Image: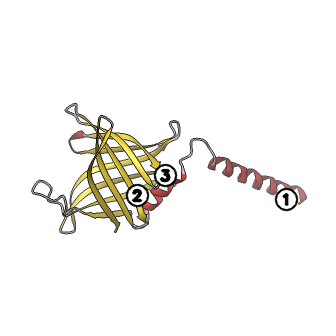
Protein backbone atom coordinates (compact mmCIF):
# COMPACT_ATOMS: atom_id res chain seq x y z
CA UNK A 1 0.00 0.00 0.00
CA UNK A 2 2.80 2.39 0.96
CA UNK A 3 4.61 1.67 -2.34
CA UNK A 4 1.41 2.32 -4.28
CA UNK A 5 0.97 5.72 -2.57
CA UNK A 6 4.58 6.65 -3.31
CA UNK A 7 4.11 5.58 -6.96
CA UNK A 8 0.94 7.68 -7.28
CA UNK A 9 2.71 10.70 -5.74
CA UNK A 10 5.72 10.31 -8.07
CA UNK A 11 3.44 9.93 -11.11
CA UNK A 12 1.60 13.09 -10.07
CA UNK A 13 4.87 15.02 -9.78
CA UNK A 14 6.06 13.73 -13.17
CA UNK A 15 2.75 14.69 -14.81
CA UNK A 16 2.86 18.17 -13.26
CA UNK A 17 6.47 18.61 -14.38
CA UNK A 18 5.65 17.50 -17.96
CA UNK A 19 2.70 19.93 -18.11
CA UNK A 20 4.89 22.74 -16.77
CA UNK A 21 7.58 21.98 -19.35
CA UNK A 22 5.01 21.87 -22.17
CA UNK A 23 3.78 25.34 -21.21
CA UNK A 24 7.36 26.64 -21.32
CA UNK A 25 8.57 24.94 -24.49
CA UNK A 26 10.46 27.41 -26.68
CA UNK A 27 8.32 26.67 -29.75
CA UNK A 28 4.99 27.12 -27.94
CA UNK A 29 2.55 29.76 -29.22
CA UNK A 30 2.43 32.94 -27.14
CA UNK A 31 -0.63 33.78 -25.07
CA UNK A 32 -1.78 36.59 -27.40
CA UNK A 33 -1.95 34.13 -30.31
CA UNK A 34 -4.00 31.57 -28.38
CA UNK A 35 -6.26 34.31 -26.94
CA UNK A 36 -7.06 35.62 -30.44
CA UNK A 37 -7.99 32.14 -31.63
CA UNK A 38 -10.26 31.69 -28.60
CA UNK A 39 -11.89 35.11 -29.13
CA UNK A 40 -12.47 34.71 -32.87
CA UNK A 41 -13.93 31.22 -32.54
CA UNK A 42 -16.08 31.79 -29.44
CA UNK A 43 -19.80 31.18 -29.92
CA UNK A 44 -20.62 30.64 -33.58
CA UNK A 45 -17.24 31.98 -34.71
CA UNK A 46 -19.09 34.23 -37.14
CA UNK A 47 -18.42 37.97 -37.38
CA UNK A 48 -20.28 40.48 -39.60
CA UNK A 49 -19.31 43.97 -40.77
CA UNK A 50 -21.24 46.64 -42.63
CA UNK A 51 -19.92 47.43 -46.13
CA UNK A 52 -22.09 50.47 -46.93
CA UNK A 53 -19.06 52.81 -46.93
CA UNK A 54 -17.39 50.85 -49.76
CA UNK A 55 -20.43 49.56 -51.65
CA UNK A 56 -20.62 50.32 -55.41
CA UNK A 57 -21.79 48.67 -58.63
CA UNK A 58 -18.69 46.44 -58.71
CA UNK A 59 -18.99 45.66 -55.01
CA UNK A 60 -22.71 45.28 -54.28
CA UNK A 61 -22.30 43.54 -50.90
CA UNK A 62 -24.18 45.10 -48.01
CA UNK A 63 -22.03 43.26 -45.51
CA UNK A 64 -19.15 40.85 -45.21
CA UNK A 65 -18.92 37.93 -42.84
CA UNK A 66 -16.10 35.78 -41.57
CA UNK A 67 -16.44 32.38 -39.96
CA UNK A 68 -13.63 30.99 -37.82
CA UNK A 69 -12.94 27.49 -36.48
CA UNK A 70 -10.11 26.46 -34.22
CA UNK A 71 -8.33 23.14 -34.49
CA UNK A 72 -5.79 21.08 -32.59
CA UNK A 73 -6.77 22.24 -29.10
CA UNK A 74 -6.98 25.90 -30.14
CA UNK A 75 -3.47 25.98 -31.61
CA UNK A 76 -4.52 26.91 -35.17
CA UNK A 77 -7.44 28.56 -36.91
CA UNK A 78 -9.13 28.35 -40.29
CA UNK A 79 -11.73 30.67 -41.70
CA UNK A 80 -13.46 32.13 -44.68
CA UNK A 81 -14.73 35.53 -45.81
CA UNK A 82 -17.88 36.01 -47.87
CA UNK A 83 -20.17 38.76 -49.12
CA UNK A 84 -23.81 39.16 -48.08
CA UNK A 85 -26.88 40.70 -49.71
CA UNK A 86 -30.25 40.79 -47.91
CA UNK A 87 -28.70 38.89 -45.01
CA UNK A 88 -27.71 35.92 -47.19
CA UNK A 89 -24.33 34.63 -48.29
CA UNK A 90 -23.81 35.30 -52.00
CA UNK A 91 -20.09 34.83 -52.69
CA UNK A 92 -17.05 33.45 -50.89
CA UNK A 93 -13.83 35.38 -51.52
CA UNK A 94 -11.14 34.05 -49.22
CA UNK A 95 -10.21 31.05 -47.16
CA UNK A 96 -7.74 31.54 -44.33
CA UNK A 97 -5.37 29.48 -42.27
CA UNK A 98 -3.30 30.73 -39.36
CA UNK A 99 -0.97 28.68 -37.20
CA UNK A 100 2.05 28.98 -34.98
CA UNK A 101 5.23 27.75 -36.66
CA UNK A 102 7.27 26.25 -33.78
CA UNK A 103 10.54 26.12 -35.73
CA UNK A 104 10.41 29.75 -36.83
CA UNK A 105 8.59 30.86 -33.66
CA UNK A 106 6.11 33.02 -35.48
CA UNK A 107 2.46 33.14 -36.50
CA UNK A 108 1.98 32.22 -40.15
CA UNK A 109 -1.00 33.64 -42.05
CA UNK A 110 -2.15 32.08 -45.33
CA UNK A 111 -5.02 33.11 -47.65
CA UNK A 112 -6.41 31.42 -50.73
CA UNK A 113 -8.74 33.21 -53.11
CA UNK A 114 -10.34 33.53 -56.51
CA UNK A 115 -8.21 33.08 -59.59
CA UNK A 116 -5.61 31.05 -57.72
CA UNK A 117 -4.33 33.98 -55.65
CA UNK A 118 -2.29 32.91 -52.63
CA UNK A 119 -1.23 35.16 -49.78
CA UNK A 120 1.34 34.17 -47.18
CA UNK A 121 3.07 36.05 -44.43
CA UNK A 122 3.36 36.41 -40.70
CA UNK A 123 1.56 38.08 -37.81
CA UNK A 124 2.91 39.54 -34.59
CA UNK A 125 1.72 41.45 -31.56
CA UNK A 126 2.41 45.19 -31.30
CA UNK A 127 1.07 46.54 -28.01
CA UNK A 128 -2.70 45.97 -28.00
CA UNK A 129 -2.82 45.31 -31.77
CA UNK A 130 -1.95 42.41 -34.02
CA UNK A 131 -0.18 43.21 -37.27
CA UNK A 132 0.31 41.03 -40.31
CA UNK A 133 2.39 41.41 -43.46
CA UNK A 134 1.55 39.16 -46.40
CA UNK A 135 2.73 38.80 -49.98
CA UNK A 136 0.00 37.92 -52.47
CA UNK A 137 0.95 35.96 -55.54
CA UNK A 138 -1.28 35.89 -58.64
CA UNK A 139 -1.10 33.25 -61.34
CA UNK A 140 -0.28 36.06 -63.79
CA UNK A 141 3.02 36.61 -61.93
CA UNK A 142 1.91 39.64 -59.92
CA UNK A 143 3.11 40.08 -56.35
CA UNK A 144 1.60 42.59 -53.90
CA UNK A 145 2.19 43.16 -50.21
CA UNK A 146 -0.71 43.81 -47.87
CA UNK A 147 -0.70 44.62 -44.19
CA UNK A 148 -3.44 44.33 -41.60
CA UNK A 149 -3.77 45.80 -38.14
CA UNK A 150 -6.47 44.38 -35.87
CA UNK A 151 -7.68 44.88 -32.33
CA UNK A 152 -10.48 43.83 -30.01
CA UNK A 153 -11.99 46.80 -28.16
CA UNK A 154 -14.15 44.17 -26.41
CA UNK A 155 -14.88 40.46 -26.85
CA UNK A 156 -17.69 41.12 -29.33
CA UNK A 157 -15.97 43.77 -31.48
CA UNK A 158 -13.06 43.22 -33.87
CA UNK A 159 -11.60 46.18 -35.76
CA UNK A 160 -9.44 45.56 -38.82
CA UNK A 161 -7.55 48.01 -41.01
CA UNK A 162 -5.92 47.04 -44.29
CA UNK A 163 -2.89 48.60 -45.96
CA UNK A 164 -1.05 48.33 -49.25
CA UNK A 165 2.66 48.05 -48.49
CA UNK A 166 4.73 49.79 -51.14
CA UNK A 167 8.49 50.22 -50.68
CA UNK A 168 8.04 49.51 -46.98
CA UNK A 169 5.40 52.23 -46.53
CA UNK A 170 2.01 51.16 -45.13
CA UNK A 171 -0.63 53.00 -47.18
CA UNK A 172 -4.10 52.96 -45.52
CA UNK A 173 -6.96 51.27 -47.37
CA UNK A 174 -10.11 50.14 -45.53
CA UNK A 175 -11.24 49.93 -41.93
CA UNK A 176 -13.98 47.52 -40.83
CA UNK A 177 -15.65 47.04 -37.46
CA UNK A 178 -16.79 43.46 -37.10
CA UNK A 179 -19.47 42.37 -34.62
CA UNK A 180 -19.86 38.88 -33.25
CA UNK A 181 -22.99 37.27 -34.72
At 34% across and 41% down in the image, what residue appears?
134
Q: Which residue occupies the foreground of this view, 175 or 96? A: 175
The mark that comes first in sequence, 1 or 2, is: 1
* Residue 73: x %, y % from top left: 52, 54
Quadrant, the N terminus: bottom right
Q: Would you name the residue on which mark 1 appears? A: 5
At 12% across and 58% down in the image, what residue appears?
56
Determine which of the numbered discs, if any, sits on residue 151 in the image: 2
Q: Nearer the viewer, mark 3 or mark 2?
A: 2
Q: From this view, report whether residue 180 is shown above or below residue 120.
A: below
Query: Which element type, helix, strand or loop, lies under badge 3?
Result: helix
Query: Which element type, helix, strand or loop, lies under badge 2?
Result: strand
The mark that comes first in sequence, 3 or 1, is: 1
Left or right of 18 on screen, residue 95: left
At 64% across and 47% down in the image, what residue appears?
24
Question: How many dots with numbers?
Answer: 3
Task: Work out how far the residue at label 3 is from the one at label 2, CA to CA, in angstroms.
Answer: 12 Å
Determine which of the numbered discs, if any, sits on residue 33 in the image: 3
Amino acid sequence: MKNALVLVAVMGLVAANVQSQEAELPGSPPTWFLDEIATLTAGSGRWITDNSQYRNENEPYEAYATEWKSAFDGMSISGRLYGMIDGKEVAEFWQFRQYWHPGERKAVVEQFGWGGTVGIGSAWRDGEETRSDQSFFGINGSVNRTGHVSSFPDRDTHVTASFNIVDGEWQPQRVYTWRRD
